[in-house]
Amino acid sequence: MANAEIIDLIHRLYTKCREQERTIASAPFESSPREYVNQLSPPPGVMHCNRKTVTLFEDESFVSQLLLPLQTLTWKVDLYTYVTGALPNDPDFEGNGGSVMIVMVHSGLMSFTIAPGGGSLHRINAPTSVEPQVQLPPSGSGIQNGEYWNYTIAYQELMHLYNNGGNSTIEFNALYKEDFSRLRHKQSGIVTSNGVEFGSSFTEPSSIPRYNLSGVSVFRTTNPSAFPLTFSFDAYAFLDLSWLKLECLKTKQITVDLAI
C-alpha cells in the first residue's frame, strides 16, 4: 500500500472516530444483569475484614500514537479482604490453616470508538507474595444465544472468620453472582503467572459501542506480614487492522492494607 493511500485511510479513520464519539452519548447500553447477588460483606463485629472502593479511571480517554481516539473508560474496583483460618499474629499462620483472601469486583463503563478491530484488556498484576486464584467469568464460558453471548459470574467461598476479640469464629459464606450479556463479541478471563487478565475485542460490526464493565478477580496469600500490598492495574486499548495497529496503555496502582 502506497504512503498516500495509508495517509488517506488514516484520515478517513480519524473522521470516523470523531463521528463515532459524537454518537456514543446517545447509544444504548447493553442490558443490565439478569441476576445480581452481592453477599461479600461479613456481619458486624467480624475482625480483620475490610472493604474499600477505588476509582482507577473516570471517563478516561485512550488516544493512540496517531492521536486517534480508541476508547473511553470508567473502571471502579471494590476490594474485599478477609483473614480466615487463623489470626494474623499467629506465629504459625500458614501451618494452622490461615490465609488472606482478596476479592476484587470490577465495574464501570467501556465506550469503544472503533469496531470491528477495536478491543480492550484489563490486567491486574499482583506482588510475588500473592497467588492469583481465578478470574471470572473465565474464557470460553459464554453461552451463545443468537447475537448475544451470555455470561455468569459465580463466586462462592466458605470462610472461617474471627469475632469476639479473636476468641471465637463464625462461618461466613462469601457469595457473588452476576449475569450479563455481550452483543456480537466474547469476554475473556485468564489467570497469568503473576496476576489475572480480562477483556473483550470486536471482530465484527456491533451496534453497541459501549457496555458495562464486569468481572471478579480472586487472590490469596498466606503471608499477612507482607501487607500493605501494592497491585498494579493495566488498562490497554487497541485497534488491530490488517494494515494498521494502534494502542494505548495506562497503569494505576492500589495499596491494599490488612484490616485490624
Image: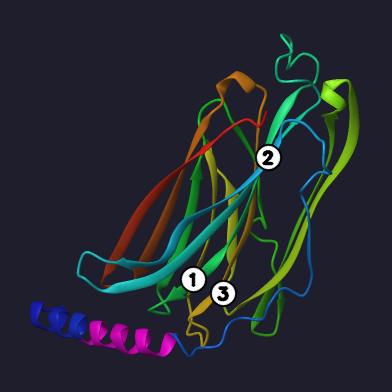
Residue lying at 74% horizontally and 13% vertically, measured from the top left: 90
The residue tagged 1 is 110
- Circle 2 sits in a helix, a strand or a loop, which is it? strand
Q: Earlier in the sequence, mark 2 or mark 3?
A: 2
Q: Nearer the viewer, residue 6 or 152?
A: 152
Left or right of 231 in this view: 49: right
x and y percent of residue 55 in the render?
A: 50, 56
Q: CA distance from mark 1 to mark 3?
A: 14 Å
What whole-number distance in Å separates the C-alpha atoms at marks 2 and 1?
Answer: 28 Å
Count residues near mark 3 (Cα–Cα under 10 Å), then give few for <14, some for 14-19, many for 20+.
many
- 170, above or below 17, in the image: above
In the rendered structure, which segment of residues is drawn in magenta? 12-24
Q: Give the x, y percent position of residue 108.
A: 55, 66
Under circle 1, the secondary element is strand
Q: Quadrant of residue 119?
A: bottom left
**Closer to the N terminus: mark 1 or mark 3?**
1
> Where is mark 2, residue-wise?
50
For the N terminus, give its image quadrant: bottom left
Above or below, 139 against 16 in this view is above
Image disc number at residue 185? 3
Which type of secondary structure does the marked residue at label 3 adopt? loop
Give, as a three-letter code, the residue at label 3: His
Query: In which quadrant is the C terminus drawn?
Result: top right
